[in-house]
Image: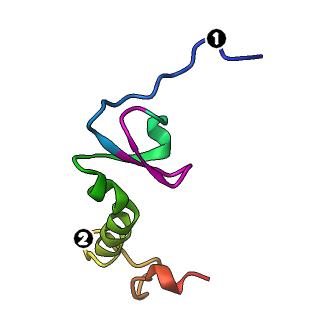
Amino acid sequence: MAALFRRKASGQPGEWYYCLRHRTVEEGPDCPGKDRFGPYPTRAEAERAMETARERDATWRHDPRWNDPDEPGDAPRDADDVP
């Protein structure tokens, strides 16, 4: 059964997004919010979205306020340590 109501993508022209599904930069409301990062003020910042996400993830992983050991006495794990 086809959906009676389709969710319209939210956003405005002049806002830039990185679409995770298509792996492209898009302006305005092309894809649903669940499939994109943004909005970014410029195309260049949207093009850098994955790099920005990796940098923020690395910062978070090494932040002692958010990086609890798994077991008592364990050292915090890095993402590279996971098999």
User: Up-down: is 61 above or below 18?
Assistant: below
Q: Residue 65, labelled with which disc?
A: 2
Q: Is residue 60 magenta?
A: no
Comparing marks 2 and 1, which lies closer to the viewer? 1
Q: Quadrant of the N terminus?
A: top right
Residue type (three-letter) at the residue carrying disc 2: Arg
How many C-alpha atoms fall within 10 Å of the one at disc 2: few (<14), some, or many (≥20)? Answer: few
User: Up-down: is 70 above or below 16?
Assistant: below
Q: What residue appears at the point 32 percent right and 65 percent down from the top-left corner? A: 52
* Numbered circles on residues, count: 2
If you read the primary sequence from the N terminus, does the residue marked by circle 2 or circle 1 appear first? 1
Q: What residue appears at the point 32 percent right and 72 percent down from the top-left corner? A: 55
Extreme-right residue of the structure: 1
Q: Quadrant of the C terminus?
A: bottom right
**Label 1 secondary element:** loop
Q: Residue 4, labelled with which disc?
A: 1
Residue 58 in the image: x percent, y percent? 34, 75
Residue 62 in the image: x percent, y percent? 30, 79
Residue type (three-letter) at the residue carrying disc 1: Leu
Horizontal arrangement in the rendering, residue 35 relative to residue 46 (left or right):
right
In this view, the residue in front, 1 or 61, is 1
Residue 33 in the image: x percent, y percent? 44, 37
Q: What residue appears at the point 26 percent right and 75 percent down from the top-left corner? A: 63
Residue 3 in the image: x percent, y percent? 66, 17
Q: CA distance from mark 2 to mark 1?
A: 46 Å
- Applied colour scheme: rainbow
Horizontal arrangement in the rendering, residue 44 relative to residue 17 (left or right):
left
**Label 2 secondary element:** loop
Extreme-left residue of the structure: 41
In this view, the residue in front, 38 or 83, is 38
In this view, the residue in front, 27 or 50, is 27
Segment colored magenta:
17-29
